[in-house]
Image (cartoon, coloured by chain):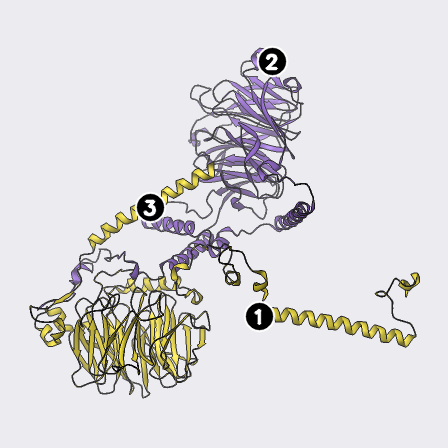
Chain colours: A purple, B yellow
């Protein structure tokens, strides 16, 4: 007889020293883990609940400004520095990490409408220049006393503008070329400027072949560096090429698209240089491919009132938008619905928004004269995370991803409390939409001729070239 | 284009994940050092010839120490192991309860209840156990203190505990199966199993899907979930069912009972639960079958009055002969239980409990996060919290547990629509869907009826009122009537 019953050596299963961790044995036999799918689902529900429990996106409010915030810009070479422009003409430089204002500049006599940093390539590697434009008809270039993140030694005031350009009209927006010392401004028409001359070198008005209209937003492309996009008050978004302007003194129109509403801001995707997103007055954001302006790459729906500002995360995977419905929304660049919605009880109309350079924070500026700092991921932990906790967070994320389509999980993950006003408008919009759909259905059912269905990606475009 | 690319990329990712999981699995398997126990016969001998005393002479001291009896005279005894397999509780019919750390041969607590005990069952850890005694099910803690009296479990016969749902189920004398959540105290379900008197009826748990099975005196086996009042499955087996168990994979069901038509009436039939129309094969027994247990590795133990017969690898195919025989020493067998993670079988007898070694009956590789025989106090506490947080809902108990959280192939919510779906075309038969007298339909039609009556009554009242005033009824429906009628 040969017999050997199972007989375990206890020492192999229990820890030998007090300091050791308890020993753990794993079995991958599925029979040892009955109802695994249901249990994972339950874990996913718990993970979703935890995510919502930890979702505390608001970090801080910076209340140094005395009037509504009109513009925000981030330093392209620093994760900490950003500037804000105010309706009283003041510009402030901020340190995101310490949440303090490092410099205050009485920059303009009128509202600061636009701001941007001058890319490092232009000034031979020095990226401490930024420019502001205003309704007081001036563009000013300012120099930060210290580059980078050390501000403590440089609390000195910036009193003098490095250079001043005077336009013959109030300006609404500004953007700088990525490598040449040129910039464009938007007023009643778009104008191209050179650092060397104090008059614009070309205009992009009626001469360029399309009707002139006040410019609301303007942005240079990072890859095709001589082309820029500008949004005008006649609902158009137009692509210009500056290179043609040297010969005939008029901008060359590369293409345009006309929407049904005004576009308040255009921003290029920093990692997909063909794509830009337009923040529109109808509450939608539209992603365009500049090669196909007759169709939207994506329609991002969520805001209920005018979207005023948009900014991409440095990777281009996400963007953030700000709206007159008092909310800030975060989006996956590929997604038609927002990932998260931030709002505060006292946050008023949001005019400016900015994604931080480490893509961990989002900065919003609103009419209540406050700049708010939010976490880009609402439930992310600020501060050091230990390895086990990191693993747990990863596991929870994997679970919620796996079961995100299951109703129990998705309702927890997707449910957001919204301001009452937004809720009411959403409800109203939903009703309007169902009515329209019903009507369309009836028309289609009863009309003898076949009724053409317009895809959503074309439905909002009135005209294009 | 983007969507398509992304989907295919995700598909590749999933494949990658599978491959990596398979690779990791092999590494984990290598870490599992323990091997399954075995018993092999010498030439010319059979394994079933060996008795426990023969084996006792050949095994190591650690095993030898665990081969012993707990003798008491208040039987017959029911036995139950806790989930780690370290503790065993036994309850004698005459009211005796013995709690032991059986591996250390230590009696932790002994008490006499003065009431009849019909079954005993450990709950999620060794600190709580339930006893089917006298009028109700009671819950005691490890010190023998009565924690709860579950008054909705009237005259319980058999108990079962679903660890992942935290449900304690009692089969009551009045043929009800009562599920109670032991974490919240709520009744998760009370099903009338419609079987008359339930004394001696087996109640077994399919650990793979937490479905409970009852064996009835008319020869039926019914499978139950607290979510529905009707059995999930009814299997007609023999003339009477006296014992029942499922294997760990949930695929095989062993039913012990009496087939009066057969010249050898006492038999064990093995069913494939997925195809329960007829048994796959059956084993004959010499006497009436008291209990059947299937171990984690698929060793089936069949207890008759004086003998426990073990079959190895006898579920998927019929075993040519029995694996082992365990003969009771002058006592009748009443209840069996394989010890989790140990090659041992506990037998509750009329005179206490015996521990018989059954080599190869236990899965040598356990998962510490499921049940850990070497768990520390801290680990036990943590696992208890985890168990409570990850408690499954009672209505998730169904025959195919992989359906929970999976994607519906029909789209939308599963419901009556699925039943009314044409299998070929996949369209829903609206007429069929609207049929049936559900409570909702009744309520709706009732409401409509009362509304109609109300309107008719109002119209009649108006007519009477008009008649009293000497005016005729408006002719609205007959014709247009006089133009001025509309001003009346």
Q: Earlier in the sequence, mark 1 or mark 3?
A: 3
Disc 1 from disc 3: Cα separation = 47 Å
Please tell me whether mark 2 sits on a helix, a strand or a loop: loop
Please tell me whether mark 1 sits on a helix, a strand or a loop: loop
Residue A356: x and y in percent read 47, 36
Q: Going 43% across and 27% down the picture, which residue do you hit?
A: A147
Which numbered disc covers residue A249? 2
Q: Would residue A97 be visible to someone looking at this image?
A: no
Q: Is residue A170 left or right of residue B279?
A: right
In front of the other: label 2 or label 1?
1
Residue A393: x and y in percent read 38, 49
Disc 2 from disc 3: Cα separation = 58 Å
Q: Chain of mark 2?
A: A
Q: Going 45% across and 24% down the picture, which residue do you hit?
A: A127
The quadrant in which the N terminus of chain A is found is: bottom left
Q: Chain of mark 3?
A: B
Q: Nearer the viewer, residue B297 or A180?
A: B297
In front of the other: label 2 or label 3?
3
Q: Which residue is tagged 3?
A: B17
Q: On the same chain: label 1 and label 3? A: yes
The image shows residue B245, relative to residue A74, as above or below, that is: below
Q: Is residue B45 left or right of residue A78?
A: left
Q: Which residue is tagged 1?
A: B438
**Extreme residue toward the left, this view:** B43
């Amino acid at each position: 007889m040969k017999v050997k019953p199972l007989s375990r050596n206890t020492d192999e299963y229990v820890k030998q020293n007090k300091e050791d961790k308890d020993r753990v044995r794993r079995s991958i036999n599925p029979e040892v883990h009955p109802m695994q799918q249901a249990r994972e689902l339950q874990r996913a529900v718990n993970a979703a609940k935890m995510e919502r429990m930890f979702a505390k996106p608001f970090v801080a409010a910076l209340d140094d400004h005395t009037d509504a915030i009109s513009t925000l810009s981030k330093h392209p070479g620093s994760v900490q520095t950003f500037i804000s422009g105010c309706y009283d003409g003041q510009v402030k430089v901020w340190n995101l990490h310490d949440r303090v204002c490092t410099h205050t500049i009485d920059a303009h006599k009128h509202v600061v409408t636009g701001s941007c940093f001058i890319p490092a390539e232009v000034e031979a590697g020095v990226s401490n220049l930024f420019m502001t434009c205003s309704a007081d008809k001036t563009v000013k270039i300012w120099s930060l006393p210290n580059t980078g993140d050390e501000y403590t030694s440089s609390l000195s005031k910036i009193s003098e503008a490095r250079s001043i350009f005077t336009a013959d009209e109030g300006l609404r927006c500004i953007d700088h070329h990525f490598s040449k010392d040129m910039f464009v401004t938007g007023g009643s028409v778009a104008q191209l400027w050179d650092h060397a001359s104090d008059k614009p070198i070309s205009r992009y008005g009626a001469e360029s072949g399309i009707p002139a209209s006040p410019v609301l937003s303007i942005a240079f492309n990072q890859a095709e560096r001589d082309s820029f996009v500008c949004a005008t008050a006649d609902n158009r978004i137009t692509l210009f090429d500056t290179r043609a302007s040297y010969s005939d003194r008029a901008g060359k129109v590369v293409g345009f698209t006309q929407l049904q509403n005004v576009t308040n801001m255009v921003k290029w995707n920093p990692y997909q240089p063909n794509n830009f997103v337009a923040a529109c007055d109808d509450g939608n954001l539209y992603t365009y491919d500049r090669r196909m302006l007759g169709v939207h790459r994506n329609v991002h729906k969520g805001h209920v009132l005018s979207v005023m500002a948009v900014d991409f995360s440095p990777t281009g995977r996400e963007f953030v938008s700000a709206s007159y419905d008092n909310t800030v929304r975060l989006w996956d660049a590929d997604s038609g619905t927002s990932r998260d919605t931030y709002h505060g009880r006292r946050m008023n109309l949001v005019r400016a928004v900015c994604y931080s350079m480490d893509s961990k924070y989002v900065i919003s500026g609103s009419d209540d004269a406050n700049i708010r700092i939010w976490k880009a991921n609402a439930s992310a932990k600020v501060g050091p995370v230990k390895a086990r906790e990191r693993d747990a967070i990863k596991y929870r994320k994997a679970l919620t991803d796996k079961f995100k389509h299951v109703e129990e999980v998705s309702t927890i993950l997707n449910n957001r409390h919204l301001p009452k006003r937004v809720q009411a408008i959403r409800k109203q919009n939903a009703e309007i939409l169902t009515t329209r759909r019903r009507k369309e259905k009836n028309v289609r059912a009863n009309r003898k001729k076949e009724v053409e269905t317009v895809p959503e990606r074309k439905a909002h475009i009135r005209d294009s070239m | 284009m983007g969507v398509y690319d992304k989907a295919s990329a995700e598909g590749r990712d999933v494949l990658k994940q599978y491959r990596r999981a398979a690779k990791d699995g092999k590494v984990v398997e290598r870490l599992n050092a323990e091997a399954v126990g075995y018993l092999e016969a010498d030439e010319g001998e059979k394994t079933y010839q060996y008795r426990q005393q023969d084996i006792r002479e050949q095994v190591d001291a650690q095993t030898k120490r665990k081969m012993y009896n707990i003798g008491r005279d208040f039987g017959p005894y029911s036995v139950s192991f806790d989930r780690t397999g370290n503790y065993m509780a036994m309850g004698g019919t005459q009211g005796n309860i013995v709690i032991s750390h059986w591996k250390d041969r230590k009696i932790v607590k002994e008490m006499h209840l003065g009431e009849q005990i019909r079954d005993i069952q450990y709950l999620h850890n060794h600190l709580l156990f339930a006893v089917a005694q006298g009028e109700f099910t009671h819950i005691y803690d490890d010190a023998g203190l009565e924690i709860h009296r579950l008054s909705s479990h009237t005259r319980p016969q058999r108990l079962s505990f679903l660890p992942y749902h935290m449900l304690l189920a009692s089969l009551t004398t009045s043929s009800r199966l009562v599920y109670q959540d032991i974490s919240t105290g709520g009744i998760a379900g009370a099903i009338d199993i419609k079987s008359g008197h339930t004394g001696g009826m087996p109640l077994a748990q399919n650990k793979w899907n937490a479905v409970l099975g009852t064996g009835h005196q008319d020869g039926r086996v019914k499978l139950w979930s607290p979510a529905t009042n009707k059995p999930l499955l009814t299997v007609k087996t023999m003339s009477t069912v006296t014992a029942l168990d499922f294997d760990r994979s949930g695929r095989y069901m062993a039913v012990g009972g009496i087939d009066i038509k057969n010249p050898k009436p006492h038999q064990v039939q093995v069913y494939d639960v997925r195809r329960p129309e007829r048994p796959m094969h059956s084993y004959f027994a010499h006497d009436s079958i008291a209990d059947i247990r299937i171990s984690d590795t698929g060793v089936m133990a069949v207890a008759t009055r004086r003998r426990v017969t073990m079959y190895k690898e006898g579920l998927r195919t019929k075993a040519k002969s029995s694996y082992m025989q365990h003969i009771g020493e002058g006592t009748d067998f009443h209840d069996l239980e394989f010890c989790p993670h140990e090659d041992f079988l506990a037998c509750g007898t009329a005179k206490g409990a015996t521990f018989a070694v059954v080599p190869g009956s236990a899965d040598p590789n356990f998962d510490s996060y499921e049940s850990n025989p070497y768990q520390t106090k801290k680990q036990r506490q943590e696992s208890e919290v985890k168990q409570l947080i990850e408690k499954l809902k009672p209505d998730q108990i169904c025959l195919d547990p992989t359906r929970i959280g999976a994607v519906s192939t029909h789209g939308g919510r599963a419901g009556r629509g699925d039943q009314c779906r044409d299998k070929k075309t996949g369209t829903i038969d609206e007429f069929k869907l609207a049929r049936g007298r559900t409570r909702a339909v009744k309520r709706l039609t009732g409401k409509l009826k009362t509304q109609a009556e109300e309107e008719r009554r109002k119209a009649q009242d108006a007519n009477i009122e008009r008649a009293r005033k000497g005016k005729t009824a408006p002719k609205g429906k007959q014709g247009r009537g006089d133009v001025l009628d509309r001003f009346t």
